[in-house]
Image (tube, helix red, strand yellow):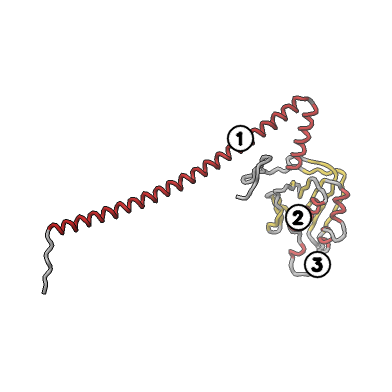
Amino acid sequence: MKTKRPRNKGELAVVAVCAVVGFLLAAQLRTVQLTGAADQATATRLETLQDLYNELTAERDGLADQVQQLQGELALYRDQAASGQAGSEALRAELDQLEITAGLTDVEGPGVSVILEDSSSSNLTGDEADYLIHDSDLLSVINELRSAGAEAISLNGERILATSEVRCTGAVVTVNGRRYAAPYVIFAIGDKDTLYNALTMRSGVVDVLSQWGITVKVTANDLLLIPKYNGSISYEYAHSVAPGEEGGEG
């Protein structure tokens, strides 16, 4: 039987050197990999920062254009105001129209008044809610008036704006954050004959409500007063768009 030849010190040294070299190569490879990952992360971060810089630059340029436009409009208004009475009257008229549209001023004019009261008919369905006035009934009247050209509308003294809510909260209706119970009184300013006919036409909103016994009284008036909106209006997400600025989904 052959016996293994004992390794000499030289062979052991070679083995040790190879092991050390292998370890160093593995460590170097690992370092290269980590460095490559770090470089990639750095490159990605730089790309992100560049995109952010480009967005901020574009936003800055857009704001600069908007400022320039507003400065031009301001200069125009100043020139009109300095030109005499005609320019001032034009600006005043435009401001008045904007205040009426925004509901920020009391308005008066011809129109119709609508008084709605809960039904006093006998309950035939077993559901009392069928004979009460709901937010959908009030909105039907308001929408009909808008469609007929009403220029200003109020409900129980609350100016109705595009942002106004009309919704049931229990046995009452909330309008502009305030609760009201029946009877409900609606004022609408506009062509009184057109508004009256729109509500009282056959199979119209008043006819439908009357079928449930709900009392609806419509009266044409030569002069109605509708108060201004007395709440606060703030916009957090909506903002104006300068002419020529392209919109899009984001």
Q: Is residue 14 visible?
A: yes
Label 3 packing within 10 angstroms: few (<14), some (14-19), many (20+): few
Where does residue 137 sit, x and y in percent of width and height? 77, 58
Rounded to the nearest whole Å, what is the CA distance between mark 2 and mark 3? 25 Å
Please tell me which residue lies in front, 84 or 197.
Answer: 84
Q: What residue type is labelled 3?
A: Ser
What residue is shown at x 76% (from left), y 61% (from top)? 132
Mark 1 or mark 3, which is nearer the start of the sequence? Answer: 1
Read off the residue under disc 1.
64
Where does residue 72 sit, x and y in percent of width and height? 68, 31
What residue is shown at x 78% (from left), y 29% (from top)? 87
Q: In the current view of this chain or complex, which residue is farthest to the front? A: 2
Read off the residue under disc 3.
122
Q: Is mark 1 on a helix, strand or loop?
A: helix
Read off the residue under disc 2.
139
Label 2 packing within 10 angstroms: few (<14), some (14-19), many (20+): some
Please tell me which residue lies in front, 134 or 85.
Answer: 85
